Image (cartoon, rainbow, N blue to C red):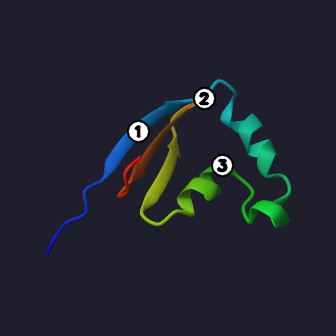
Amino acid sequence: MNKPIYQTMKVVFAEPIRALNEMFSDTQSWGVSTLKEWIDGYESTRFTAIDGHTAIITSEYNM
């Protein structure tokens, strides 16, 4: 059985993550209410904020 190969990326946003979350205020259009929900919505992809501007994104897919 092949194990998936995950890639990890550290992302430092110029704007605070809480400010980026405001982009998702129209949940009817986006289908989610936060950046984390939007990224986590991709299969085998996870978003973990580690501070106000930085997150770790892990995915089985090429990034």
Judged from the image, the secondary structure of the residue bearing numbered disc 1 is strand
Q: Which mark is residue 59?
A: none
Q: CA distance from mark 3 to mark 2?
A: 12 Å
Q: Residues within 10 Å of mark 3 (few under 14, many from 20)?
A: some
Residue that protrudes farthest toward the front in the picture: 62
Which residue is identified by label 1? 9
Which residue is identified by label 3? 35
**Percent from the top left, x then y, of residue 21?**
74, 44
| Image quadrant where residue 18 sits | top right
Query: Which residue: 40% across, 49% down?
Result: 58
**Percent from the top left, x then y, of residue 32?**
72, 61
Which residue is more in the foreground, 6 or 53?
A: 6
Which residue is more in the foreground, 50 or 2?
A: 2
**Percent from the top left, x then y, of residue 34?**
70, 52
Judged from the image, the secondary structure of the residue bearing numbered disc 2 is loop
| Image quadrant where residue 37 sits | bottom right
Q: Residues within 10 Å of mark 2 (few under 14, many from 20)?
A: few
Q: Residues within 10 Å of mark 1 (few under 14, many from 20)?
A: few
Label 3 sits on what residue type? Answer: Leu
| Image quadrant where residue 45 sits | bottom left
Which residue is identified by label 2? 13
